[in-house]
Amino acid sequence: MQTQLPWAGEVANDATSIANAAVKLYQDEAAWRCASDLGQKNAQLLFEQHKNFIAFESRLTQVLTNLAVHRQDNFIGSMLNHHHHKSTKYMSQWIEAKNKS
């Protein structure tokens, strides 16, 4: 995901550089605190819980209000549901036939 927010870590192209960056963060408490604070700040800006919750709640209410229409428009869900029930039906028929013999 690309954003305009400053990156909290380091970018490296090989295993040695990645390891050195990890060691630097582990050994330098100031660098760790800076990266940690920046990462938390970025996470709060990117994932605003209240805003996302309101959008989720609105969508959920919309689907529940128009459930029949939603199910009718959800072709893949209907297809998966149909095949799930058919597979259960045929599995039970196979078990019955197996137990008869």
Image (tube, helix red, strand yellow):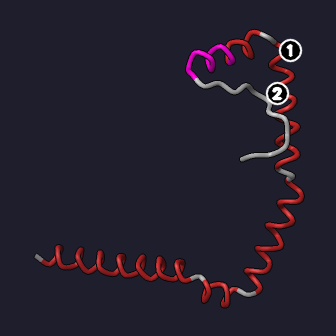
User: Is most of the magenta stretch helix, strand or loop?
Assistant: helix
Judging depth in this view, the residue of 67 and 44 nearest the camera is 44
Quarter of the picture holding the C terminus = bottom left
N-term mark: 2 or 1: 1
Judging depth in this view, the residue of 97 and 49 nearest the camera is 49
> Measuring 24% from the left and 74% from the top, which residue is drawn there?
95
x then y, percent, for residue 4: 84, 43
Q: What residue is pinned by disc 2? A: 36
Is residue 20 magenta-colored?
Answer: yes
Residue extending furthest toward the front: 13
In the picture, measured across the screen, residue 98 lies left or right of residue 61, that is left
From what the image shows, is residue 18 above or below residue 83? above
x then y, percent, for residue 20: 65, 13
x then y, percent, for residue 54: 87, 65
> Measuring 22% from the left and 78% from the top, which residue is drawn there?
96
x then y, percent, for residue 6: 84, 35
Q: Tally the numbered discs.
A: 2
> Measuring 67% from the left and 90% from the top, which residue is drawn there?
69
Is residue 40 magenta-colored?
Answer: no
Q: What residue is pinned by disc 1? A: 30
From what the image shows, is residue 18 above or below residue 6? above
What span is in magenta? 14-21
Estimate how packed mark 1 is, as few (under 14), some (14 to 19) or many (20 or more) residues with alpha carbons within 10 Å: few
Task: Quadrant for residue 94, please give it.
Answer: bottom left
Residue extending furthest toward the left: 101
In the picture, measured across the screen, residue 51 lies left or right of residue 76, that is right
The amino acid beneath tag 2 is: Ser
Q: State the SS at label 1.
A: helix
From what the image shows, is residue 30 above or below residue 56? above
